[in-house]
Image: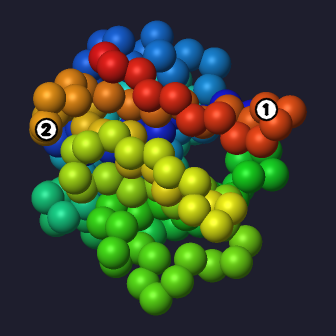
Amino acid sequence: MRVGVISDTHGMLPASVHEVFAGVDRILHAGDVGSAAILAELEMIAPVTAVCGNTDPPGLAFALPARISVAVGGVRFLVGHILGELVHPAVPADVDVVVFGHTHIPTAEARNGVWYLNPGSASRSRGGHGHTVAIVEGTAGGLEVRFVTL
């Protein structure tokens, strides 16, 4: 199982995403997509599951859920844009990875058996982190998360 995780594209998708996500089983987009064209381009790489973000235009925000749960290779992902809104009051018991965006800061932390993952921003960096995405892979030892600078 290999999943590409992206967020905060804000209507711009670096060409290098195609190479980084080549061969993934699914792409998760944690909001602030910017336009439907971004989702269409990502769909050319792999199936996409996406949520709306706080800056998505009304037409796109209406078409996308605020949060969604999806299983890939037996791993359950809970995807949303703003972490505090996504896990309030608690993370559902069957979730393995909580994916969120909004801060534009790449973060991966395992707490109480659940990964909390923010891939950073693919288009607008903050705090000197550059434009980043993440790859989640299932390994013999569990889940491995790595960030890729675009």
Name the image quarter holding residue 55: bottom left
The residue that disc 1 covers is 139
Secondary structure beneath label 2: loop
Q: Position of residue 99 (x, y in %)?
A: 47, 55
**Where 141 sits versus 132, above or below?**
below
> On the picture, is 66 further left or further right than 139?
left
Q: Mark 2 — residue?
A: 126
Q: Is residue 123 visible?
A: yes
Q: Residue at x 14, y 29 (%)?
A: 128
Picture colour scheme: rainbow
Q: Work out which quarter of the rendered image holds the C terminus and state it.
A: top left
Residue 65 seen by the camera: no
Mark closest to the chain's N terminus, 2 or 1: 2
Identify the amino acid type marked 2.
Arg
| Residue at x 25% of width, y 60% of height | 53
In this rendering, the answer to whether 41 lies above or below 143 is above
Structural crowding at the residue carrying mark 1, measured as other residues with C-alpha within 10 Å and reported as few (<14), some (14–19) or many (≥20): few
Q: Is residue 60 left or right of residue 79?
A: left
Quadrant of res 87: bottom left
Front-lying residue, 12 or 84: 84
Residue most extreme to the bottom: 89
